[in-house]
Image: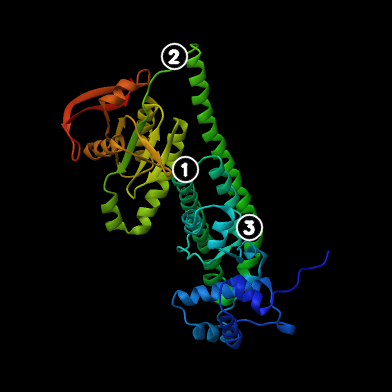
Amino acid sequence: MSRPPSPTRRDVARRAGVELDDVDRLVELGLLHPGADDTYSDADVRRVRWIRGLERSGVALDDMAAAVRDGALSFEFLGSPAFDRFAAHSETTFRELSERTGVPFELLVVVREATGFARPAPDDQVREHELAIVPAIELQLAAGFRADVIEGWLRTSGDSLRRIAETEAEWWKTEVTTPLVEQEGMREGEMLGAQADLGARMAPLAEQAVFALYRGQQEHAWSQSAVEYVEAALEGAGLISRLRRPPAMCFLDITGYTRLTEERGDEAAAGVAARLATLVRRSSTEHGGQPVKWLGDGVMFHFRDPGQGVVSALEMKEGVLDHGLPPAHVGLHAGPVVFQGGDYFGRTVNIASRIAEHAGPGEVLVSQEVVDAALGAPVTFTPIGPVELKGVSGSIRLHRAARSG
């Protein structure tokens, strides 16, 4: 099989999304080295994109060139196979893509924004990996999906993957690049080259792991939906009668987290957050719940079964103390919620948050709605009377939860 021709100067400019003069300037500075007959490599396309990105971030080209000449910096690491995954610009503009596929321009804009980059103009070139996303959008639109639903899917997917990518970048820094500089005594230029080989081996395995985790989460979500469909079918046939239990929202906050941050520093606070994350994920999952989002000093949960939510809350409260963390205060409320963009909204969420604020250290408080829906759960409730909560109209009947026996 014949190899594709090497990129020319014009190819590099097009695929990197820059002008021909920009390529010439990088050659003059010694940041780019064309081969015979003005030929380049795919790695040169990446070098142009990354160097221009650094320039737009405020790093002067002349300073980069001086550092390369001095040996303090090198861009050779961009030739590693680990970077082959980063697509170049295609020859198609956003305007042309919209006209060809029928996908609204504003929806194509979301594709670019979901990957973490700024809003494109109609005549900006679409990147090759962005083209790979469009067929899914075309099928969704053809199947009657609303544009706002597709946008929510893109943004939620992008935000979740952003957190994964940022976490990878952080542990790559602490576990690979920093030790090479501090323990091995390498200069930054040497380090960038040394870490590239490990990156080439690690990247495909990391992608494989993330995809496997996604499939596992997908199976879990689809299974939950299937249970609801089957129950509805059996109920419609008069074969079972489902218990009507509203979901519960739960807020767990760590008492004194802010003071801990001020007294012991951000690193200590981050350690608390890491231990809390491990504890609450395990407990909530075991009881049919899921952490929805992290709030600095606490966590918000969704539980399909309020009774199991209370059991999990009590377990987490005890686990917090067992792990040497400051006491937790927890609040739960059951009722209808709105799910959108991977998050939950509505009055139920607001009341649960206010109940958690009202709870004292080491206390789990729940609303009357949770008590009514928690029949059969191995817990007891002690009424503490109607309570006025900040931002909630009227009084709320609260109960203190405890384990049975």
> In the rendered image, which quarter contains the N terminus?
bottom right
For marks 2 and 1, the one nearer the N-term is 1
- Of the two numbered discs 2 and 3 in the rendering, the one whose residue sits closer to the viewer: 2
Q: Which residue is mark 2?
A: 241
The reply to whether residue 141 is visible in this rendering is: yes
Q: Is residue 146 above or below residue 4?
A: above
Q: Report whether 139 appears left or right of 36.
A: left
Q: Is residue 24 above or below residue 373?
A: below
Q: Report whether 89 appears left or right of 383.
A: right
In the picture, residue 379 is in which quadrant? top left
Q: Are marks 1 and 3 in contact (CB under 8 Å)?
A: no
In the picture, residue 2 is in which quadrant? bottom right
Q: Which residue is mark 1?
A: 146
Could you give the CA–CA distance between mark 1 and mark 3, rounded to whole angstroms? 38 Å
Q: Callout 1: helix, strand or loop? A: loop
For marks 1 and 3, the one nearer the N-term is 1
Q: Pointer 1: residues within 10 angstroms few (<14), some, or many (20+)?
A: few
Front-most of 163 and 273? 163
Residue lying at the far bottom of the rendered structure: 28
**Amino acid at pointer 3:** Met
In the picture, residue 72 is in which quadrant? bottom right
Q: Which residue is mark 3?
A: 202
- Of the two numbered discs 2 and 1 in the rendering, the one whose residue sits closer to the viewer: 1
Could you give the CA–CA distance between mark 2 and mark 1, rounded to whole angstroms? 33 Å
